[in-house]
Every structure is written in structure tokens, then in C-alpha cells.
Amino acid sequence: MNKNIRIKDIAQLAGVSVGTVDRVLHSRGQVSRAAYEKVMEVLEKTGYKPNLIARTLGSNKTYFIAALIPDPSQDEYWGMSGQGVQHAIEEWEQYGVRVEPFFFDLYDTASFRTRSEMVLDANPDGILAAPIFHEEAARFFEVCHSREIPFVVFNNNVPEARPLSFIGQDLHQSGRVAAELLHLNRHPPALFAILHIYDDIHRSTHLSEKEKGFKEYFDNLNHGQFQVLSLDLNYTHEPTLKNELAELMSRPDLKGILVTTSRGASIVSSMLEKRGKDDIRLVAYDLLKQNLNYLKKGIIDFLINQNVRQQAFTGVGQLANRLLFNKKVPQTYLFPLEIITRQNLESYLSANFH
Amino acid sequence: MNKNIRIKDIAQLAGVSVGTVDRVLHSRGQVSRAAYEKVMEVLEKTGYKPNLIARTLGSNKTYFIAALIPDPSQDEYWGMSGQGVQHAIEEWEQYGVRVEPFFFDLYDTASFRTRSEMVLDANPDGILAAPIFHEEAARFFEVCHSREIPFVVFNNNVPEARPLSFIGQDLHQSGRVAAELLHLNRHPPALFAILHIYDDIHRSTHLSEKEKGFKEYFDNLNHGQFQVLSLDLNYTHEPTLKNELAELMSRPDLKGILVTTSRGASIVSSMLEKRGKDDIRLVAYDLLKQNLNYLKKGIIDFLINQNVRQQAFTGVGQLANRLLFNKKVPQTYLFPLEIITRQNLESYLSANFH
DNA sequence: CTGAAAGCGCTAACAC
DNA sequence: GTGTTAGCGCTTTCAG
């Protein structure tokens, strides 16, 4: 029976002490050429695998991960990311990994800057961040690099920052999925609208990616008769927004709408409902309370779930596994594009959280 | 700074020894009422959380989990469950949990019986099983109960066996989801067929559950003009099968087909393709190679993913967590009903495995 | 350069 | 009933 080989065993086989074995294992300290080679040989031959449990206990290190995310109380979507971090705090506590959230104001880049300062001052061993302010985040990540603090980003990527890992979805594909769901069984002529409904400061590349995928889908169909309309709408002045939406909805050829921001869906839904427009298909994002209501009523036909809660949780997990066990983490970790309907909704809500 | 509380600390605070604390923690051995209460009090007050790393290292136990599953080489679907077990083997090895698969012949109940004997002889600490032979499985689980070996079932449930945990999907809901996908944007009059295509021995309650959900969905629509047809077809005699399918497909009112078994879809697909019947919507199960091909070609419109790979992996995880850390495991762990289309397929295939 | 030895937090055998 | 103690496998300090 191949009982597990311990450092002690390989020391014995190589005729050296455990100290020396440890030194070659971690290339720390000086080891004579002879000893080094002997140990390496035994290591190979036995196929030694370190006991990671013992390793973390022995080193008795405790790690600190900072999570730089939007204030969960400001927004339901970001509330879910807060939940993911909370879950991670509990999960990793017992492994000696302390996770602390740093909340910034969703609408205030200055707050992002001050919070990110605080993160750096706290001197974390790893950072999870939702880089929703692109430029500020990029600057922040520069500093992380120079201080050699590994960081993972989720929700949206900042590729040039070269994070340890990006966790999120393929937004281009997301746009294509949405287009497909609108297209399903529709015949030309028809107009499909993609609406970006956001407040002043949050117009991100995020949204353009979805739009590209969306348009690409319809382009590839090459019956020219499908028309696609893209609209940027401002969330902050409601009357204007409503006017623009009303105008859009009055077009008789309009057969489907995609709302790219999770919060934007409810206003579109409520207007469609009031007007009894149940021939217009509506696709939106995320399992927000309002969205679920409209999905159940049949106003929203499909939701695409971005699962930001799980994203945040996974992000912390990546960092912890890296720090604790030195595990490789995938450079990009893409979540599946989950399609939610009235009928499978329940199964997602009750689905346990690994 | 709230440095982590160790057993030593709480022993000190309670004025007892670590041995006593350990005894109340694990309710092993005798402890005086007074000591018990004192310790409990300190435990509560300090919010003590054991260091699981140290626990597993200290106890130095090694657990053995047997996985009783169909031979992965016989069938692509069950091949995926084999992969899940394989993944679990690697995952848990480092925690001192040995997982060993026991493969039985998918088409031979006798083989199930002999393999389950072997499982018992191996004297495992926990069992994961795919109870596809209902009666035989029920008998086997009786023995498990009498020997007090905890077992988890996945894929399909055997509720009367009262497993530690069932891992799978809500099949009733699954049928409803399928119905919805067929119904989408179809107007009456229309005929929808639900096909159970299986070989002799595998007609299970499994399939009837899906059928109930399917019919329920259409009943609830209460436009009487949707017709539903349910057909049991035998996989083993292909010419007969093809005849029956041909007859079905010739009905002009047929607008959609659900195939409830993952393997059954390819034959239906190939026939639809040959006949150029692209107005008949097809919904099927699972990411089998053939199914993916037909999905990409647009013959299959939707796949519902049962994710049996992840089910098996999760099942082992439940047992391991229970044995190692004494974690509570949910009595039923339902997986989401994942809807796969041509456009989001890629995101599922590349989605990393936690 | 190398070995010995003291931990890490917890378990479990053993003595009283 | 209770306390003591020797591990678990690895890290890390400290002599030499």
C-alpha cells in the first residue's frame, strides 16, 4: 500500500535532514550541490506530494484580502455582490483568511479613490475589486502591480491592468444570446431595440460589448429586413426617459426590446404593462426583485443572469486558494450565460449555493 | 485585536483542560454537568470556531467513499458522471479522503447487485450512488441503513430509501420548462409530443415526472386547442421506432417535440433533418456530442442541461464535508434547470468548474 | 551549509 | 470525570 510519503521519508531516503529537504522544496537557503541532487532524485522517484493541510497549519500564516466593491445598500445588483463577499468572509474565516469589504459610493469616483487608498493602507495580501470606474481603477491597479499585491477583478474587466484573474461573463456572447431570444420565431419585417438605460457616470464599455454581440447576431441572419435600433437613455431625468420610451413603443414594427442594464428593465416593463403591449418581447438582466415580478407576470420574457453574487464569492476563493495553497488560478473565469424564464426561475432561486 | 480563539484559550477561560473541552465539543466521553455548562458558556461567549485545518491534520483519519455508478464507457451521459467522480477523487485526495468508483453494467441488474456487494465488502465510510435500478437500489440502501453507512443519491431519487441527501433536479419543473420552450410564441391549434425513448429496462418514474410537468403546463394555459401527445418508444428495435416517429412527423399540426431521454434526441433529430422539418421545434436533454451538433445546426432548439457531472462531484463533496468537517448537508440539493441554446452553449462549455 | 527541535491547533490514548 | 501528552506533516528558528 502506497502510504503517503512525508518529508521525513524523503529525508531518510536521501540521507539528509528534513530541514534540507524543505530548503530544496522551497529553494530557500543554501544547499550543497550534492545534497540538492540527491534530494531531487528521491523527490522524482517517489512522486512526493506535499500535504497542503499540514503546510498551511505549519506555516501558521494568516492572510488578509480586501474587497473593494460598491456600497451594497445603494443598489440591488451590487447588494448581491456584497452578499457574495459576506459569504466568502464566513467561508474563509476558518482557514485563517480574513476578508474585509471596503465599500465605495457607486456614484462618486472620489469615494472610489479614497477607499482604494484605504485598501492600500491596510496592506492586504490580495485584492478583489469591481472596477466600475475604469480610469480610476486602472490607476489603482498600477499601484497594486508596483507593490506586487495580486488582485482579481470581477463583473467587468480592465484587461490592460493585467489582473491575476478576471471573473465575469463574455459580454459579446451575452449580446448574442439576448438577440437570439428576441429573434426566436419572429419573422421579418421587425424592429428590435437595444436600450442602454443608465445614469450619467456609468456608461461603460461593458454596454458596448453587449451591443456589438447583439448587432452581430442580426447581421449574421442576413435577411436585411430585421431592423436594429440602439438607444442611450438617461435614467436620471424620468420624464424625458418616458417620452423617449413612449415614442419607441408606438412604433408598430417593434417586436422586441433588450435592456442592457439590470436596473433599467423595470421602467420599460411598467410602461409595456400599462400599454398592454404584450406582443413586444422583453429581455433583461439579473434576478432583481422587480425583474422577477415582471418575469412572473410575463412582461419580461427572459432574464439573463449575471450571477454577480457568485462572481464575488468565486473571486475571493481564487485569491484565497492562491495565497493559501499556491493553486493556479485561471486568467479568465467566465460564467455561463444563464437564461431564466418563468418556468425555470424557481429552480434558480432555490438552487443551493455550492 | 480578536486573535483567533483556540481550544487552549477556551479551556483556560473555563478553568478546565483541553481534553474536557474536546469532549464537550464532540460529545464523546463523560463530562460533569458543571464542566459542561461552564465550557458551553465560554464557547458561546467567545463564538469559538474550530480550526478545520488543524482538525483534519490532528485527527489524521482517512476516509473512504465508494461511488456506485454505471460504467462510464457504456454511455456518454454516464460518462459525464464518471468524470465528476474522477474530479472528486483528485479534489479530495489531499484531504485524506479516498474515493473509489465501482462501475456496474447499465443494462444488467445482476451486475448492480454484485457491485453493490463489493461496495459493502469494501466497508466504506460513505456511499454515492446512481440508483437507476429502483428495486435493487432500494434493497441495497436498506442494508446501508442497517449498517449505518451514510449514502447520497444523485440523478434520480429513491425517496423511501431516505438518503442523507438527494442531488438532482426537480423533474416536474423540468417538464414545465420544456413545455414552455415548445410553446413560446406558438399559437393554437398545435400538437406537442413528449417522447420517452428508452431501452427495455430503463423506463423509470423519472420520465413520468417530466411528463406530468409537461402536461400540467399546457393544461394551465386553458386554450383547449393545444393538443399533447405522449409516446413510449423502444430504442432497441430501430425500424419500428423509425416508423412510429415517421408517422408522428407526418402530422401537419405537430409543432414541437420533447425527447425526455438524453440519448433519444439524436435519432429524432436525424429524422427531422432528413425531412427538412425545421418548423418543428425540438427540445432535448443534456450536452451530449450528438445533441450539441444538432443544436448548432438548429435542429434541436433547446437543450436542458442536467449537469450530471457536477451532480456526481457535488455528491462526493457532500459526503466528504460531512465526514471530514461534520457539516450539515441539505436533504435535497436541486440543480438549476439550465437552458442551453446555440448562443449560450459556448459559455457553458467553457465555463470553469469551480 | 546542515541538523535538531519547537511550534501550528486539534485529536485521542492513557493515566489518575 | 478529568488532565496530560504524544502525535499529525510541515515550517522556521537557532546552533553549530
Image (spheres, coloured by chain):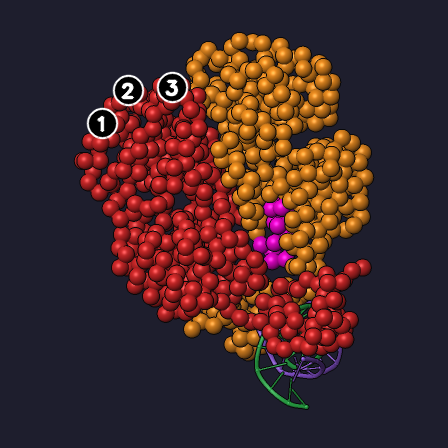
Chain colours: A orange, B red, C green, D purple
Bin the neighbour count of mark 2 within 10 Å (Cα to Cα): few under 14, some 14-19, many 20 and up. Answer: few
Tag on residue B252? 2
The image quadrant that residue B279 belongs to is top left
Q: Chain of mark 1?
A: B
**Is D10 placed above or below A117 here?**
below
Q: Are marks 2 and 1 on the same chain?
A: yes
The image quadrant that residue B104 belongs to is bottom left
Nearer to us in this view, A66 or B314: B314
Is mark 2 in CB contact (under 8 Å) with mark 1?
Answer: no
Q: Real-space Cα distance between discs 2 and 1?
A: 11 Å
Q: Are marks 1 and 3 on the same chain?
A: yes
Q: Where residue B66 appears, x then y in whole percent?
A: 42, 62
Q: Magenta residues?
A: A313-327
Nearer to us in this view, A214 or B142: B142
Q: Secondary structure at mark 2?
A: loop
**Is B148 placed above or below B260 here?**
below
- Can the viewer see residue A142 in this picture? no
